[in-house]
Amino acid sequence: MEQHYKLFRVKELADNDTDFIAALAAAFLEEVPVDAERLKKAVAEEDYFNAYQAAHKMKPTVDLFELGVLDTLIEVQDWGKFEKRGEDISSQLAIVISAVDNATAEIKSDFNL
């Protein structure tokens, strides 16, 4: 439990309400993997606007669950925001996607979702 994510800030936000913590975990699973797929697709297609939008949307949840890749996600976001043509963001994207995948699998297992 909590190897690829941390619940400290989630518990603090939820005031240790286990139902609310479980609801936040479920919301993570509903939103973040979908946004991560959108981000991967946008980067692959050099769709800067959608890359920015997806990364920006993911930031609060990635931060709240402390996946440890917030700064890397911001790099991907800025790639889209500032349309950094010719810059290869694939290694940063891979780090973010790996962290999301690992946290998603672990949260599913930990919360039986």
Image (spheres, rainbow, N blue to C red):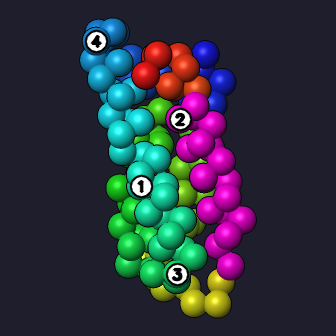
Q: Is residue 23 above or below residue 63?
A: above
Identified at 67% across, 70% down, the residue is 90
Sequence-earlier tag: 4 or 3: 4
Whole-angstrom CA distance, mark 2 to mark 4, is: 19 Å
Q: Which residue is mark 2?
A: 104
Identified at 49% across, 58% down, the residue is 37
Crowd tier of the residue under label 3, counting other residues whose Cα lies within 10 Å: few below 14, some 14–19, many 20 or above: few
Q: Which residue is mark 1?
A: 35
Identified at 54% across, 57% down, the residue is 73
Identified at 44% across, 63% down, the residue is 38
Can residue 78 be seen from the camera position used here?
A: no
Q: Answer whether labels 2 and 4 touch (C-beta < 8 Å).
A: no
Give the magenta part as a residue range.
88-105
Tell me the tag on residue 45: 3
Q: Is residue 15 above or below residue 48?
A: above
Sequence-earlier tag: 1 or 4: 4
Q: Which residue is mark 4?
A: 19
